[in-house]
């Protein structure tokens, strides 16, 4: 118990004194997660909109597949992306394996399904009355779709934040695609796994506290946007 | 202004409108009355070109707007509809009222003046920055009316616009509708309130079981109904109101 207490105090010291190694890993984690989320948003929001606003054969099956992919184990995505990016894989020529860029690709693949699904759910939450009002007030189809998306902004923002949270906290892709290379691809989750196995509990705890704090902030933001955004 | 010729509508496998023919002439107020489930809302939505029809024709200013997306869109831009529930957008009153102008590409400076005028017209001057959640039911419905009127429609469609309001607020909305009618805008209103129809309409259409059971001036429908069916409906509905 004392060890945990002492570890916690030392971890807080590392955070409060802005230990260079802690800061570097945290900043890298945030940058990679932000990049993945930004790319995933440009894929998931239009894809979610397309699936919600258009009816076509097989639509329900696609939504079912997307929902199944929510809980895709991160190591499975890691394995898939590893095979794609490895030298003999179809994307091997890009040289992305064991690079931050490769981690961005992997995390994007990981979070696109959940962000697409949540975008569909966000748009489904807007009543037909909003569409009717927009159309009856003279909006074109495109303008009405834009209005519905604006009305769903809070839930869509929550989808983006949840995608960011999943990207930041996953370990499988980061480990398998990034390789946990010090000063290059080491991020919060992979560093915690490594330092714990090496016995540097204080450093692990410092990173763990940061990770939990960021997750907490993201969750608070999700609650904020779902409750009283822009009021 | 707008004419339905033998309009048929099928919703959920049921024939809701069975060949409805009626016309609202330019500048007149037409009330559509009838029991619940008679197809009033379906008809109004078809007149607003929100829903497709399964048979018949719809003429707007003499042009067929039954099909053809472009023709329907252009006709829709000359009309506006107020629904039973105001269903305002989750933004400020100003943004709600200016919506129809913004989608038409009206300039910002022009919008400000028109919005202020429309809000004054409905008695909500100074409400620009309020949000729908802070409005009473009556205020929200007045914003919905301002939102429709600001586009200066040739045809205003009202679907039970006072149904969910207390009598005093409903009366205030009726005064507004009466001013709109006097301003020369064609009004088509679906209502279950026969006193309202008598008060505001020039002519009345009685819809029963998806068919027009009677059509005529207010006096013809209420004082000299042409059929026993219409007479029964009009008398039964008026009894609680007058006695």
Image (cartoon, coloured by chain):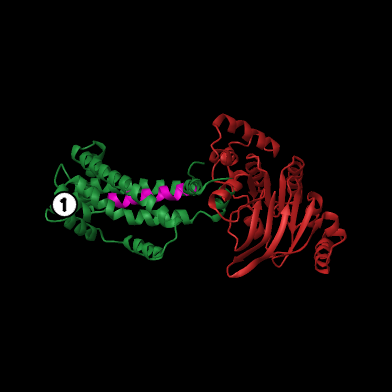
Chain colours: A green, B red
Task: Give percent across and percent down for residue A105.
Answer: 24, 50
Quadrant placement of the N terminus of chain A: bottom left
Q: Would you say A220 lies left or right of B145 here?
A: left
In front here: A161 or A66?
A: A66
Using the rendered image of the protein, determine whether residue B94 is visible from the camera's viewpoint.
yes
Q: Residues within 10 Å of mark 1 (few under 14, many from 20)?
A: some
Q: Would you say B222 lies left or right of B75 here?
A: right
Range of residues picked out in magenta: A151-168
Q: Could you tell me which residue is drawn at 31 percent across and 52 percent down?
A: A166
Task: Give percent across and percent down for residue B40.
Answer: 69, 60
The answer to if A156 sits in the magenta stretch is yes
The answer to if B91 sits in the magenta stretch is no
In front here: A107 or A206?
A: A107
In front here: A183 or A153?
A: A153
Q: Could you tell me which residue is drawn at 27 percent across and 54 percent down?
A: A109
Q: Magenta region's main secondary structure? A: helix
Task: Give percent across and percent down for residue A10.
Answer: 22, 43
Residue at the outermost top position: B109
- Please identify the quarter of the rendering in which residue B215 is found: bottom right
Q: Which residue is mark 1?
A: A194
Q: Would you say B147 lies left or right of A52 here?
A: right
């Amino acid at each position: 118990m004392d060890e945990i207490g002492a570890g916690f105090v030392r971890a807080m010291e590392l955070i409060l004194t802005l230990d260079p190694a802690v800061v570097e890993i945290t900043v890298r984690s945030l940058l990679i997660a932000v990049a993945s989320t930004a790319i995933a948003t440009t894929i998931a929001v239009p894809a979610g909109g397309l699936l919600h606003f258009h009816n076509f054969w097989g639509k329900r099956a696609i939504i079912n597949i997307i929902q199944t992919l929510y809980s895709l184990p991160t190591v499975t995505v890691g394995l898939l992306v590893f095979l794609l990016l490895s030298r003999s894989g179809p994307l091997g020529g890009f040289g992305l394996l064991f690079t931050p860029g490769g981690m961005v690709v992997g995390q994007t693949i990981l979070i696109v399904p959940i962000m697409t699904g949540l975008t569909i759910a966000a748009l489904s939450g807007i009543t037909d009355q909003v569409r009717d009002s927009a159309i009856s007030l003279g909006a074109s189809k495109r303008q009405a779709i834009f209005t519905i998306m604006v009305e769903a902004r809070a839930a869509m923002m929550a989808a983006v934040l949840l995608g960011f949270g999943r990207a930041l906290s996953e370990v499988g892709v980061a480990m398998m695609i990034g390789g946990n290379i010090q000063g290059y691809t080491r991020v919060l989750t992979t560093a915690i796994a490594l330092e714990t196995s090496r016995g540097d509990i204080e450093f692990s705890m410092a990173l763990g506290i940061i990770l939990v704090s960021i997750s907490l902030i993201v969750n608070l933001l999700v609650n904020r946007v779902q409750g009283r955004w822009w009021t | 202004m707008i004419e339905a010729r033998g309009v048929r509508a099928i919703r959920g496998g049921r024939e809701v409108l069975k060949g409805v023919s009626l016309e609202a002439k330019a500048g007149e107020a037409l009330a559509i009355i009838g029991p619940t489930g008679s197809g009033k809302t379906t008809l109004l939505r078809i007149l607003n070109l929100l829903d497709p029809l399964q048979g018949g024709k719809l003429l707007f200013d003499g042009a067929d707007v039954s099909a053809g997306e472009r023709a329907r869109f252009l006709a829709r831009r000359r009309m506006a509809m107020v629904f039973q529930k105001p269903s305002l957008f989750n933004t400020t009153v100003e943004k709600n009222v200016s919506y129809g102008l913004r989608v038409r590409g009206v300039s910002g400076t022009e919008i400000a003046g028109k919005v202020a005028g429309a809000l004054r017209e409905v008695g909500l001057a100074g409400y620009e920055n309020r949000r729908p959640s802070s409005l009473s039911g009556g205020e929200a419905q007045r914003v919905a009316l301002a939102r429709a009127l600001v586009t200066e429609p040739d045809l205003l469609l009202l679907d039970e616009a006072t149904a969910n309001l207390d009598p005093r607020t409903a009366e205030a909305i009726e005064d507004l509708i009466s001013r709109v009618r006097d301003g020369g805008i064609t009004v088509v209103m679906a209502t279950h309130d026969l006193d309202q129809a008598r008060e505001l309409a020039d002519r009345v259409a009685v819809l029963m079981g998806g068919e027009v059971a009677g059509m005529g001036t207010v006096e013809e429908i209420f004082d000299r109904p042409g059929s026993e069916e219409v007479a029964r409906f009009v008398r039964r509905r008026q009894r609680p109101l007058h006695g």
